[in-house]
Image (cartoon, coloured by chain):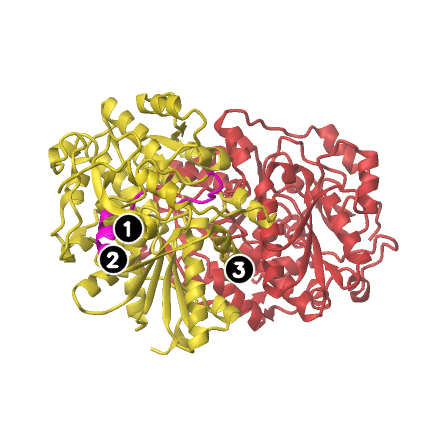
Chain colours: A yellow, B red
Amino acid sequence: MSNEKIPYKIYLEESEMPKAWYNLRADMKNKPAALLNPQTLKPMTAQELSGVFCDELVKQELDDTTPYFEIPDEIKKFYKMYRPSPLVRAYCLEEKLQTPAKIYYKFEGNNTSGSHKLNSAIAQAYYAKEQGLVGVTTETGAGQWGTALSMACSYFGLDCKVYMVKVSYEQKPFRREVMRTYGASVTPSPSMETEVGRKILAEHPGTTGSLGCAISEAVETAVKNKGYRYVLGSVLNQVLLHQSIIGLETKTALDKYGIKADIIIGCAGGGSNLGGLISPFMGEKLRGEADYRIIAVEPASCPSFTRGKFAYDYCDTGMVCPLAKMYTLGSGFIPSANHAGGLRYHGMSSVLSQLYHDKLMEAVSVAQTDVFEAAVQFARVEGILPAPESAHAIRVAIDEAMKCKETGEEKTIVFGLTGTGYFDMVAYQKYNDGQMTDYIPTDEEIQANFDKLPRVDV
Amino acid sequence: MSNEKIPYKIYLEESEMPKAWYNLRADMKNKPAALLNPQTLKPMTAQELSGVFCDELVKQELDDTTPYFEIPDEIKKFYKMYRPSPLVRAYCLEEKLQTPAKIYYKFEGNNTSGSHKLNSAIAQAYYAKEQGLVGVTTETGAGQWGTALSMACSYFGLDCKVYMVKVSYEQKPFRREVMRTYGASVTPSPSMETEVGRKILAEHPGTTGSLGCAISEAVETAVKNKGYRYVLGSVLNQVLLHQSIIGLETKTALDKYGIKADIIIGCAGGGSNLGGLISPFMGEKLRGEADYRIIAVEPASCPSFTRGKFAYDYCDTGMVCPLAKMYTLGSGFIPSANHAGGLRYHGMSSVLSQLYHDKLMEAVSVAQTDVFEAAVQFARVEGILPAPESAHAIRVAIDEAMKCKETGEEKTIVFGLTGTGYFDMVAYQKYNDGQMTDYIPTDEEIQANFDKLPRVDV
């Protein structure tokens, strides 16, 4: 089909929506490494994991051979409330850049959680409800995951306890209020509510918190309260499985119009969006059916892919969670306080880490002032104010489109626009006032955390 | 077509999108009364109006016979960035309410301005650009209109000066930041920047401002600066014309699935959303082709339809604008400070006022705690956090659906969900904390402003 026929926004029909999630691990030759018990350093069993996670989610976490998991009807119903999300042809951005590149973005921000996080939140809440649980606990950084989980729990009548990284809690008071509107309780982390929180506060009294620390608090609360389990919005295999809906819809929409992507770009914190977006494309690549350039974009202030080590590490600061093999900056790593957006996790999904290690994808890091420059440029021509996280992908999409302008190549670029920036206006204000700064960790700072990596011989 | 086939969200194809705006006035037997010159009290001529408004918009303002105005290509292109907006079947709300009613809402919040206001903002900015102007001035209350205009001006490279009602400016700091991100300047009103602002501040030093006052400041600034014109986001005939796209899309979507609406509900401040939503339906009603119950919903704290007078009044506090015949609470009316949302204008569109006067539509007023109760109920089942303005329509849609539950009638209810509440979290917080109060003006307060209405014999 000719490009002129392609609408600004491609919406799939309900009947075209994916009926199953795609499990990328099934097609990986080198499987992601197993989670390890932090005490014994042996692979976690399903039974051990079921103390922390819902039973059905444990199955999804451990299954690296089943290619498709049917989406339960209740979840499909909820998906219909805010999905399919549009695949947008960025005609206005292309015109502004005067590039021969064809730019598409999959926009996941048109729901109240403001991001793609709802795709996994509703799945995790569903399985918790099915198991007859009272509620779930979690952490949130920028607040998108916490909001998404609050919405999902409210839909299923589950209690929802959110530990929010303190610096985000203070920068984003209204995020907390959205979560409360959906009936969740929100606690700034580290807090005095948990043993691990009290310990961290005693050791680092002025800390602004980290995702790793909030995870520890949420896990402790889940384990100590009957009828609760812990849920996580990124990093885990199960999350990437649920988020595959992003990529599946994108692929169906592209196929519908006969479009072949050349470059696929996604921002990467723990990997939930990137892993979801790329999954069917990476699947084709793994099966030798097609080739794509796949680019992960991360903040220069939290560069796990580009400056981290591929090693077993703790997933949390309190070291209560299983160990995962991943690109990591060390579980003690905390991004500098001037880092404005999300993407602040010290590690990276084991699936994506393995794929990156196997050179099946690339990674670049970008400074936040460059990211906000791209965000504002995009907002003004495409009419969407992006989340700072999403703007990492915009930055590199624009960079790649400008390379096409130099070479004259008509490449097709697809990127993930994960969410909106309506709750990030403190950061935008800093940028608008010319007061935003960049911070790139020194080699010494990075090395200091490497020295504390656990010694695991596997 | 059977109801079971109706998807959760109906999106029109690009080819089905309206190519012309519909001018409801062409089908009105009793035309809305003419605007009057505030000095001479004679009908405003096109020439007089062109000092304040763009030439093409003056034509649209005065034309009450041409039924359709073709939408210029540049505007259609911009519309494609964020339109068509979905017509959503509220399956989840219906299930929650256990009502036999079929509820649909036209959701206009999926764009960065967060509301339907962008539909007219882009049109007004386009005509300003076409006329070779430098920029435009405007007022904003809740901030949706100012944000929309900032986006539109940024798209066409126009300067944009926004006077924001002081109470909103203080309640919504992040709204200002979105406007600044789009390159607009934002001034809390009343300000010391204009003569009229200084006069109002001298008379009412502690005032939290009003739309009427911000309008006066914006008009003064437009008239005193070469290459500027004033634009307005509601009330005017031209705005209702542009907003007809809401109703036209809604009607096309309903017709596509063979659905006949019984009740159409919209919130009403100045009338921009309501006038746009109902226009093709009211057109059928005026031409005797179909009948609908049409309900305007307004805040009990600013009840222009239900407690106002149908009379000529000033459109602004400073009395620099033309006079309009409308349902009005008097140009000196200011909603009590505890009023949280928009819909705070003292008057109502002349078109809607005439239709209401001719008993072609109904109006009800609702208290804000009841409105927020409906907002939270809706958010939890439909997954969209509504703007307080929009929640007025939700309140009455729920009330009507519950009446259907009592009677067993399967009525089809369509309401306008004008926008999202992401910048209204201060108000939600008050509600969540149980600290939101209602204020209903006393008869004496209402009467006091009536006594100051201008004496016009027309």
Labelled pair 2, 1 in contact (Cβ < 8 Å)? yes
* Secondary structure found at label 3: helix
From the viewer's perspective, tell me whether residue B217 is left or right of residue A457. Answer: right
> Do callouts 2 and 1 point to residues on the same chain?
yes
Q: Residue furthest front?
A: A444
Q: Residue furthest right?
A: B40
Asked whether B431 or B352 is in front, the reply is B431
> Do callouts 1 and 3 point to residues on the same chain?
yes
The image shows residue B122 at horizontal and vertical percentages of 60, 62
Q: Disc 3 designates what residue?
A: A377
Quadrant of residue B176 in the image? top right
Asked whether A444 or B389 is in front, the reply is A444
The correct choice, above or below, for B445 with respect to B256 in the image is above
- As measured in the structure, the alpha-carbon distance from the residue carrying label 1 to the one carrying label 3 is 28 Å
> Do callouts 3 and 2 point to residues on the same chain?
yes
Q: Which mark is residue A243?
A: 1
The correct choice, above or below, for B96 with respect to B32 in the image is above
The image shows residue A53 at horizontal and vertical percentages of 21, 34
* Secondary structure found at label 1: helix
Labelled pair 1, 3 in contact (Cβ < 8 Å)? no
Q: Disc 2 designates what residue?
A: A279
Mark with earlier residue (1, 3): 1
Q: Judge whether residue A199 can be spotted in this image.
A: yes
- As measured in the structure, the alpha-carbon distance from the residue carrying label 2 to the one carrying label 1 is 9 Å
- The crowding category of the residue bearing disc 1, from other C-alpha atoms within 10 Å (few below 14, some 14 to 19, many at least 20), is many
Mark with earlier residue (3, 2): 2
- The crowding category of the residue bearing disc 2, from other C-alpha atoms within 10 Å (few below 14, some 14 to 19, many at least 20), is many
